[in-house]
Image: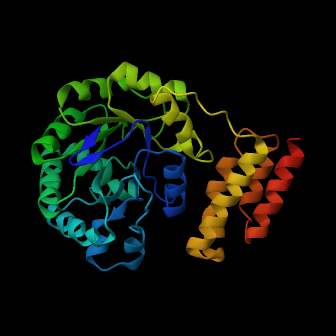
Amino acid sequence: MKFGNLTIKNGASLAPMAGLTDATLRTMAANYGATYIISEMVSAKALSFGDKKSAALCKHTSVEGVPYGIQLFGSEPAIMAQAAAFVMKYKPDFIDINMGCPAPKITNNGCGSALMKNPPLCGELVKAVVEAVDIPVTIKIRKGFDDSSLTALEVAKRAEAAGAAAVTLHARTREQMYRPPVDYTSIAALKQAVSIPVIGNGDITTVEEALSVVEQTGCDQVMVGRGALGRPWFFSQLAAAFNGQPIPAEPTLKEKMCIMQKHVYDMCNDKGEAQAMRECRTQVAWYMHGLQGAARLRGLTSSLTYYTDIEELAQLVLKLNS
């Protein structure tokens, strides 16, 4: 698969998720085999105001052979173009435009999946960003805003005409948020409608599901979001499956706890212990899924304060699940 001049290896990419896919998680995913990685979504308007927190989200994640994209959101072509030009100093390999976020604080401002109600504006946004940078521009969309505005095909066609290099489709409407069912037939229809690469997204949590989505829809690749939280090794299993290789075994519980501790340790190195220990709580809770005493363990994550708390939690997990 190619995004303009970028060659994307076989496997699955990591979906951008606000508050979750920071530099540490992106690096872990890439090292486990994610085909490309994307920043958390960054407000184009905030960048235009010189907001330092928004700029910090663009921090480059460099893993050899794994392209890195910065995802921007906004609804004004000129400001999106300005933001795209600004983030080039972080050396992204491509720019992704968010047209799929369902969060009310985003859609109420006409951004994210609210854009699915205005296909002409989507095309204008892509055109503005494409003209502002010399790297590939991709988009991430939903089926539509609701069942009365299923505009994915029109948005994708306009984006392709404006120069988009690829399109990722989360196969739900904004109205559905993250509730099932996922409509994979919409991905198949999109694949038939455009000539640029189509990436399928939505509720991919097993190797079998990933392979099935590609087989059912003909999409060029899949993107995994929540299915990889608390299990970054999932990307190594997906990479093996899509390359016809033996699928690595699931890590042992002890190995999983070592991975979790390394995850938090790297966050502490990147952000400092105080900030990292606040932000890691959601990440750590995902590592608790499916364990004996999971509810109690997830409750304990809300009080994580020092790195030593992670070490103690890992020991408790092993004790309860021995």
Vertical comparison of 65 with 141: above or below: below
Which residue is drawn at the image coordinates 43% and 29% (left, top)? Answer: 182
* Quadrant (top left, top right, bottom left, bottom right) of the N terminus: top left
Vertical comparison of 213 with 252: above or below: above
Q: Quadrant of residue 294?
A: top right
Q: Residue at 61%, 65% (x, y): give it.
A: 266
The structure residue drawn at horizontal position 20% and vertical position 47%, both measured from the top left corner, is 4
Please state which of residues 315 and 241 is positioned toward the viewer in this rendering.
241
Residue 174 falls left or right of residue 6: right
- Count numbered badges in the picture: 0
Return the x and y of residue 130 as percentages of the image width and height.
15, 56
Camera-side residue: 21 or 235?
A: 235
Residue 20 visible (yes or no): no
Q: Nearer the viewer, residue 167 or 29?
A: 29
The answer to which quarter of the image holds residue 8 is: top left
- Give percent across and percent down for residue 26: 49, 56
Q: Is residue 132 visible?
A: yes
Q: Quadrant of the C terminus?
A: top right
Q: Residue furthest top?
A: 216
Q: Position of residue 189 (x, y in %)?
A: 25, 24
Scheme by which the image is coloured: rainbow
Could you say where residue 9 lies in the image, as x and y percent from the top left?
38, 40
> Which residue occupies the foreground of this view, 129 or 77?
129
Specify whether 197 is left or right of 298: left
Rendered position, 277 above or below 1: below
Residue 166 vs residue 132: left or right?
right
Please give the name of the residue rendered at 62% of the width and 34% of the height, measured from the top-left corner.
Answer: 248
